[in-house]
Amino acid sequence: MTSDKDEKRRKKRMATLVTQAGRAPFEHFGFVNPPVYRGSTVLFPTVADLEGLNQPYTYGTKGTPTTRALETAWSEIAGADDTVLVPSGLAAIALALLTVARAGAHLLVTDSAYGPTRSFCDGFLKRFGVTTQYYDPLIGAGVSALIREETTAVLVESPGSQSMEVQDVPAIAAASHEKGVCVVIDNTWATPLLFPPHAHGCDLAIEAGTKYLSGHSDILLGLVSANAGWAKRLRHTFNLFAIGASPDDASLALRGMRTMALRLREQERAALELARWLTERPEVARVLHPALPDNPGHDIWKRDFYGSSGVFSIILKPVSKEAVSAFVEALELFGIGFSWGGYESLALPFDCAPYRTATRWTPEGPAVRFSIGIEDVEDLKDDLAAGLARLRP
């Protein structure tokens, strides 16, 4: 584990990097931010140049100076060899899995995975002969026993986007690579600022730029980054599908990236303060937050992560579904919605039980996930206290 001094140095470097990466002002007449290049057709000076594709940009689906700026910046931030941009986080998941899958392949996916990931695996991939097996997120190196001859990839998501289990990604990566299997991570919760995925052994890393990269809940964007071993194959798959992201969204993401380190730091502080406050509330049975000592995989989080983001969950003491709805609907500062990572706080009731297959989800009571924005934390406490009061008989 790194020392506090090392962590401070790294955070300083990353904070500088997110403000500088992807910028080339004098390629754009000195303007600080890359302009938005919209277009499909790109002209070539000669037939020979067209036939040889002898220029940086050849067609709109292959990228523009705007999208290339974000790809270059994200590769630097993530420690990757290449990054591609797609129109949403789910599109990034789909592209990454299609990069590693083939007919008859076997995929291992953490049982704590994002719900739409499961839907894509069990719906679309199954139609093409790909088998998905879900595994206990806390299995660690034990994943080796589940790897078959036809296994092509192991997908990790640490922590789980609702249940918050922290996975031993380095152990899973080592066991997978020993058998020639690719490791894919959904790293949206942490971003590379808090968990550098490729430095921890992941071959492909998925990020929903819709969330912390944007920071303002006004774009849809997905990113897939790759190490040297997988960059060429990822780019080839991306080019075959031609599902490039909008240059307008890429421009907004570049703008959001400049303040991402500051926002994450503040959202981490506020979320931790609220999580600790909620542990003392009589209505709450348990708080699921990776930075709390009783969270599953906390020691791994402490070893591998540089911090925590603004998303965590709580388990309420037993109450009716109607009471939970009354609690959430009474909140004035928390919106009710599926996404997270923006400047505004959100609350989302959830239940993992219907879709867990490798592990059982049997909490003491109903569960609610929070995404903490950048409102004043004392106001958020007051709002939660008023809402929780509605749970009492």
Image (cartoon, rainbow, N blue to C red):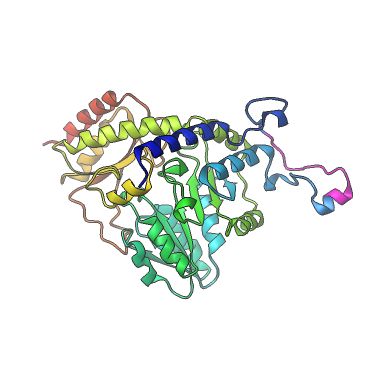
User: Residue at horizontal 61%, vertical 42%?
Assistant: 72
Q: Position of residue 148 (x, y in %)?
A: 44, 74
Among the 4 quarters of the image, the one containing residue 74: top right
Residue 233: tell me if it is visible.
yes
Looking at the rendering, the stretch of residues picked out in magenta corresponds to: 37-49
172 and 212: which is toward the camera = 172
User: Residue at horizontal 47%, vertical 75%?
Assistant: 149
Q: Is residue 313 left or right of residue 83?
A: left
Depicted 105 relative to depicted 198: above or below: below
Q: Is residue 284 left or right of residue 41?
A: left
Depicted 125 relative to depicted 389: above or below: below
Q: Is residue 370 left or right of residue 393?
A: right
User: Was residue 40 drawn as part of the magenta stretch in this picture?
Assistant: yes
89 and 327: which is toward the camera = 89
Q: Position of residue 269 (x, y in %)?
A: 32, 32
Q: Position of residue 264 (x, y in %)?
A: 41, 34
- Which secondary structure dominates the residues rendered in magenta? loop
